[in-house]
Image: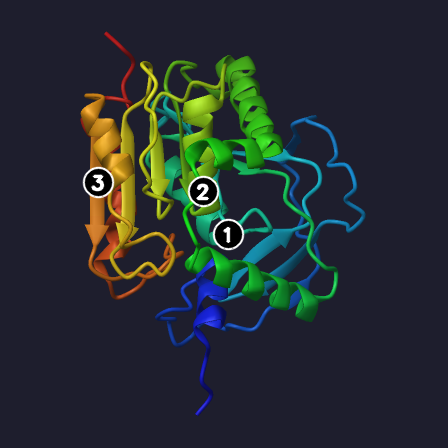
Amino acid sequence: MRMRTFATRTLAACMALTAISPVAAQEDRMVPIATPAQPAAIPLNTGKLPDAPNPESWHSQYNSVFARNVTEATLTPVLPDPAKATGAAVIVAPGGGFRTLSMQNEGWDVAKALADRGIAAFVLKYRLNQTPRDMDAFGKSMTAMFASVARPAAPPSAEARIAAIAPQIADARAAFALVRRRAKEWKVDPNRIGMVGFSAGAMLTMATALAGQDAKPAFIGDIYGPLDAVKVPADAPPLFAAIAADDPLFSGRGFGLIDSWMAAKKPVEFHLYGKGGHGFGMYQKPTTSTGWFDAFYKWIVMNGFDKPAA
């Protein structure tokens, strides 16, 4: 029987997959694929990452697709049927440890589900840290990185996380600016643009709310991101957060983020699922974590973001 080390399991989890309890039909081997056509992707013009010689490349895994070595950010609109459009919008930030992006499970599939419910969605393909061109070398580098993430000596502070992802925050700011600039064309209310992120994308979502300057998301979704305490700004948006109790990365460290939002008297909803691992996203798993999207949508409706302000 083939045994997996904890580090290998952690690698797959952090790459926004379901390696902890994979669906049997899913294929866990990373296979290089041609870069898919992305005719709707709009360049954000935040510049090309310096000292990044490796070109963007894509691979498949778990019946899903991933991008890596992204050096130029783009935003892809996924718009609802005009007859169903509510005017609400969400910028979607996939995860992948800032080294890869789960473009399908945590990007396009999320955006399509939002658009089906009348919410304009915009998938943010943000710039990434460089990884080796060779797939095997890439896998080994991710295993090493995420093994250390799973057992850190001390979690980095929110300030340290924000400083480490300045290019990605710039990409998020540019995404908000673009959607507001073209809000009339896309039938979007510029005051009802939220953001949802997964794992590393959740870190970026939180950083955008805390230090994104002019981005100012109207609401945010933090899906299996860190739950460490933060300093909540006076204009902090409503927060929806979800994580599984068996998440190998961020569960079991307390709920400081939730406590911070509550102490600041800001709206917050938190779902702790019994099982789901890390990276469940839009995968249909036999766990209650699969219900996070419906809960997120109902939360959007409950808070009135699907309707214009009176």
Exactly how many numbered labels are in the figure?
3
Asked if 308 appears above or below 287 in the picture, the reply is above
Task: Please report the residue visible at 36 percent of the width from the left and 20 percent of the height from the top.
Answer: 218
Task: Return the x and y of residue 88 as percentages of the image width and height.
Answer: 36, 23
Task: Return the x and y of residue 219 as percentages of the image width and height.
Answer: 33, 25
Seen in the image, is 281 located left or right of residue 142? left
Q: Which residue is mark 3?
A: 270
Category of crowding for the residue at label 2, using alpha-carbon neighbours closer than 10 angstroms: few (below 14), some (14–19), many (at least 20)? few
Asked if 183 appears above or below 296 in the picture, the reply is above
Looking at the image, which is closer to me, 296 or 46? 46
Task: Return the x and y of residue 171 as percentages of the image width and height.
Answer: 59, 29
- Amino acid type, label 1: Gln
Q: Quadrant of residue 10?
A: bottom left
3 or 1: tag closer to the N-terminus: 1
2 or 1: tag closer to the N-terminus: 1
Determine whether label 3 and label 1 are within 8 Å by CB. Answer: no
Q: CA distance from mark 2 to mark 1?
A: 29 Å
Q: Which residue is mark 2?
A: 156
Q: Which residue is mark 1?
A: 104
